[in-house]
Image (tube, grey):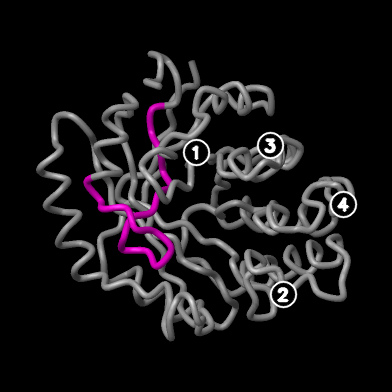
Amino acid sequence: MKLERGMIRGDFHMHTDFSTDSEAPVRSMLDAAVERGLVTVCITDHLDLDYPPDEELGPSPFRLDLDRYFDMLTGLREEYRGKLDVRIGVEMGMQPHLGNVYEELVSEYPFDFVIGSLHLIHGMDPYYGKVFEGKTDAEVYREAFRETVRCLEHMRSFDVLGHLDYVVRYGRRQAQEYSWRGFADEIDEILRCLIRDGKGLEMNMGGLKYGLGFANPHPDVLRRYRELGGEIVTIGADAHKPEHVAYDFEKAGEILKACGFRYYTEFEGRKAVFLPIS
């Protein structure tokens, strides 16, 4: 379905076959964005250093050949000029010991936008479920939020924190053991760190796709971020397939407005651009 005039028109989180977990050619994602009526997209393929070897994903998953990446995306940016504004980003998998490594990498390439996301808890991705063995969902969620705080203490080379409550997607009971109030100490510390350092928060529509009933993070978290003084919110579908580009964007603006926001954010050359929500 094509987005109506006045809706959010920039998708700032999508993956292509440069990411280990996507088979989508870049052009297929860009063509889908044009078909949906988007004005701007940012390709944010995975760079997840020290992600553990995996039988399915291979010995070094989520590595990204940045030279080839920039060569291709720079060419496609010119090819699509006039029908789609293509920006070049990356989604970095945060771990506390990688702060300096990522700082150097990001400084070497002219990214428009950098997402920092937590995908590993004690070296395990909640996507696979092992981290939940012998623990309640709530225990794992708390560990994830505390690990996020540790990452924020050591990493500054990103623009927004991606899908803050990503871990809830994969809990055995998903949101049944989750609320902002239940983890207010940890989540508020995350939000205060972001605001202190001038970093933003992503509203990731993938939570709706995964059946949570809300985008990541939960609206209560977005509302709290605004109450604490946060202003920078980007919107991304976290699409790994063309059919998920701008997923549920029809709802995005209303969610943000209900949380107290009148603007959403895009990035160009690592600079925030605020756009009104119609």
Disc 2 marks which amino acid?
Lys
Question: Is 18 placed left or right of 116 in the picture?
Answer: left
Q: Which residue is mark 4?
A: 177
Tell me how far mark 2 sits from mark 3, CA to CA: 24 Å
Q: Which residue is mark 3?
A: 214
Give the residue at x 62% y 50%. 195
SS at badge 3 = loop
The percent position of residue 252, horizontal first and vertical second, equals 55, 28
Decide: is 229 above or below 119.
above
The part of the chain drawn in magenta is 9-27
Q: Which residue is mark 1?
A: 235
Give the residue at x 41% y 64%. 46
Q: Nearer the viewer, mark 2 or mark 3?
A: 2
Q: Nearer the viewer, mark 4 or mark 1?
A: 4
Give the residue at x 56% y 39%. 205
Q: Is residue 170 magenta?
A: no
Disc 4 marks which amino acid?
Glu
SS at badge 4 = helix
Question: Is 241 placed left or right of 228 in the picture?
Answer: left
Sequence-first disc among 2 and 4: 2
Question: Is 257 placed left or right of 76 in the picture?
Answer: right
Q: Are marks 2 and 3 in contact (CB under 8 Å)?
A: no
Label 1 neighbourhood size at 10 Å, few (<14), some (14-19), many (20+)?
A: many
SS at badge 1 = strand
Q: Which residue is mark 2?
A: 130
